[in-house]
Structure formats: C-alpha cells, structure tokens
Amino acid sequence: MKVLSSLRAAKLRHKECKIVRRHGRVYVICKSNPHFKAVQGGKKKR
C-alpha cells in the first residue's frame, strides 16, 4: 500500500478503484488489482 499526497491520480489508475473514508483516513481500494491500494492521512493528535 502506497502513501500518497494526491489520491486523485490514484483513483484514475483503474476504473474499478474506489475511494473510501475510514477513521479519518482516505483509502483507495481496488479489488481486481490490489497493487493499486493507497492511503492518505496520518495519525490524529489528541
């Protein structure tokens, strides 16, 4: 899984890629080609 500064480019790599928000992070998920996985957003400070 790559950490990217821009997920717009990651979504355009494959037409089955989806952007999902989980726990303050943004993920790119691709079930047909898991090589395209990506994440954006780090730890939250308390």
Image: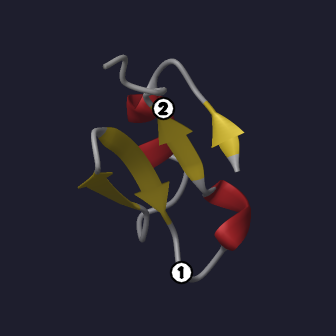
Q: Nearer the viewer, mark 1 or mark 2?
A: 1
| Mark 1 neighbour class, 10 Å CA radius: few under 14, some 14 to 19, many 20 or more | few
- Quadrant assignment for the C terminus: top left
The answer to whether residue 43 is above or below residue 29 is above
Residue picked out by circle 1:
31
From the viewer's side, name the closer residue of 42 and 34.
42
Give how far across and how far down residue 30 sits, in percent. 52, 70
The answer to whether one can see residue 12 in this image is no
Q: Name the residue at 46% across, 22% down.
A: 6
Which numbered marker is on residue 5? none
The answer to whether one can see residue 44 in this image is yes
Q: Name the residue at 46% across, 32% down.
A: 40
Kindly check if marks 1 and 2 are in contact, taking CB atoms under 8 A apart as contact: no
* Circle 2: element type: helix
Which numbered marker is on residue 9? 2
Give how far across and how far down residue 41 sits, in percent. 43, 28
Q: CA distance from mark 1 to mark 2?
A: 17 Å
Q: Name the residue at 42% across, 64% down.
A: 15
Looking at the image, is mark 1 or mark 2 earlier in the sequence?
2
Q: Name the residue at 53% across, 80% down.
A: 31
From the viewer's side, name the closer residue of 26 and 30.
26
| Residue furthest front in the image | 46
Type of amino acid at the residue the image marks with label 2: Ala
